[in-house]
């Protein structure tokens, strides 16, 4: 089996209660991860968390049943951020971790992400093995009985443990005293923990997006909808706005003037700071192909460089682990400080940025001047199918033509989303109008050749 059918760039995702996001598939996935994780004679345990979607109940109990049916115990955390599951899996010495979330997607979607015992997301080959187990029926007959079946327990202090851990990533000699922050929790997994983290470090917190009802996650709030946060920062005269997504593994910042500071800008600020302190191995930041050219130019000013990976924070982490890098992320706000966390963590990233600001005694807007974005146009195009790009002859020819005209001053990236039925067209170039036209022409060519 060489091609993943269930797993995308960030676990399994889809419309809740439609294939593959059904209770039946969740149960089978639970059995598969239990089988893979069950090594050695000791009693085994898997940690399961979720965000605030109404479908989380259905999937949580289904996947827990699958795990227990294989003789592995389950620890249920309730709603916590994705990075909390990575942290708890590692510190509880569990055999695996599972997070039920569709991240920034609407409430009617859901997803399942898996972590190994080390707190890192599963490698591609492990996901392929899980898919093979589901399709082959190889483990269907393995049915422990009597005292050998697993049991579940609710972990009452999961949020408190995570809050305490995140606070330890902030310089203990510093604090957030005197800062006013607007914190948008997206009505998602961090609705309780995020305000506590910043308040306990001394900040005055105006919390929004903290009243989930199962249906309002990411609905006009959070990292994908920073417009409300921008207005609130200006209204309250806050020093910064912190926007998390539904599972709080990504971050978008708003400066004191109400301007959005995206993941590329935060990487530039933090990367330059680490380089200047001599704390960035190889003076290298790892980012994906989506990051703006401006990031490379900003880091180059202080002797740094960028190494790019395919889209997905898991691939950023893999590159960091393989080559000894310590910091990387995505333009969308997945930021990974590998010496502090094994996966993207919006709260940890926010504290890292605020630490730079507090130490330098400078506002976020001033820090962000180190990064100048090259005009970039991104078009998300719904598609009904995803034929290989190299088979789209007209689209490929147009891309080559645009790349030739841009030369070294720009980039073209056309790819399919790994989590949604969309094609993404990204063009960067020095002339905003031409860049926009290039992107629209490529999008039109895609519509004509694929159909939508």
Image: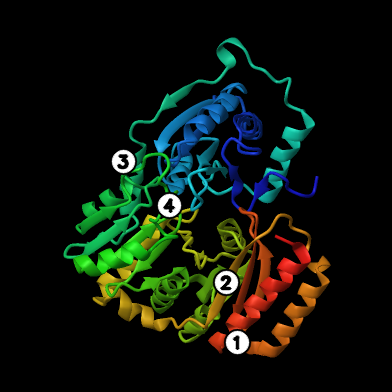
Q: Is residue 131 above or below residue 274?
A: above
Instruction: Find residue 8 and report its horizontal and vertical position in percent.
Output: 65, 51
The residue positioned 45% from the left and 40% from the top of the image is 53
Instruction: Answer with the quarter of the image where residue 432 lies.
Output: bottom right
> Is 231 in front, or is 13?
231
Instruction: Find residue 63 and report its horizontal and vertical position in percent.
Output: 56, 30
Res. 218 mark: 4
Instruction: Find residue 309 and report its horizontal and vertical position in percent.
Output: 63, 66
Tell me how far mark 4 sits from mark 3, CA to CA.
24 Å
Q: Counting other residues with Cα less than 10 Å from the Cα at mark 4, is it few (<14), some (14-19), or many (20 or more)?
A: many
Q: Which residue is mark 3?
A: 160
Instruction: Answer with mark 3 or mark 1, whichever residue precedes in sequence.
Output: 3
Tell me how far mark 3 sits from mark 2, CA to CA.
39 Å
Res. 378 mark: 2
Which color scheme did the rendering employ for the protein? rainbow
Q: Counting other residues with Cα less than 10 Å from the Cα at mark 3, is it few (<14), some (14-19), or many (20 or more)?
A: few
> Residue lying farthest left?
178
Tell me how far mark 1 sits from mark 2, CA to CA.
13 Å
């Amino acid at each position: 089996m060489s091609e993943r059918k269930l797993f995308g760039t960030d676990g399994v995702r889809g419309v809740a209660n439609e294939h593959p996001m059904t209770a039946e598939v969740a149960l089978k996935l639970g059995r598969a991860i239990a089988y893979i994780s069950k090594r050695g004679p000791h009693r085994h345990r898997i940690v399961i968390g979720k965000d605030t979607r109404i479908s989380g109940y259905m999937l949580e109990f289904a996947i827990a049943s699958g795990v227990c049916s294989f003789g592995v115990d389950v620890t249920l955390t309730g709603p916590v951020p994705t990075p909390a599951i990575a942290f708890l899996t590692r510190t509880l010495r569990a055999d695996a971790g599972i997070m039920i979330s569709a991240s920034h997607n609407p409430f009617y979607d859901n997803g399942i992400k898996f972590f190994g015992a080390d707190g890192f997301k599963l490698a591609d080959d492990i996901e392929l093995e899980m898919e093979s187990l589901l399709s082959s029926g190889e483990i269907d007959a393995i049915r422990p009985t009597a005292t050998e079946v697993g049991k579940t327990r609710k972990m009452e202090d999961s949020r408190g443990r995570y809050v305490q851990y995140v606070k330890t990533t902030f310089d203990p000699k510093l604090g957030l005293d005197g800062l006013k922050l607007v914190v948008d929790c997206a009505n998602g997994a961090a609705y309780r923990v995020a305000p506590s983290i910043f308040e306990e470090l001394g900040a005055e917190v105006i919390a929004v997006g903290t009243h989930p009802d199962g249906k309002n996650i990411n609905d006009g709030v959070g990292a994908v909808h920073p417009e409300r946060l921008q207005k609130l920062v200006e209204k309250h005269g806050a020093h910064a706005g912190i926007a998390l997504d539904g599972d709080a593994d990504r971050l978008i910042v708003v400066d004191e003037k109400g301007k959005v500071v995206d993941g590329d800008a935060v990487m530039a600020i933090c990367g330059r700071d680490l380089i200047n302190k001599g704390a960035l191995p190889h003076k290298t930041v790892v980012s994906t192909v989506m990051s703006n050219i401006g990031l490379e130019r900003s880091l180059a000013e202080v002797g740094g460089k960028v190494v790019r990976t395919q889209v997905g924070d898991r691939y950023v982490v893999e590159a960091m682990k393989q080559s000894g890098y310590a910091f990387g992320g995505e333009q969308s706000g997945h930021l990974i400080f590998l010496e502090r966390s094994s996966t993207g963590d919006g709260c940890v990233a926010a504290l890292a940025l605020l630490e730079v600001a507090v130490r330098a005694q400078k506002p976020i807007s001033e820090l962000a001047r180190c990064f100048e974005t090259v005009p970039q146009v991104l078009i998300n195009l719904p598609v009904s199918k995803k034929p290989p790009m190299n088979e789209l002859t007209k689209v490929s020819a147009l891309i080559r033509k645009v790349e030739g005209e841009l030369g070294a001053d720009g980039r073209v990236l056309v790819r399919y989303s790994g989590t949604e039925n969309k094609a993404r067209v990204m063009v960067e170039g020095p002339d905003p109008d031409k860049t926009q036209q290039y992107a629209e022409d490529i999008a039109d060519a895609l519509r004509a050749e694929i159909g939508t």
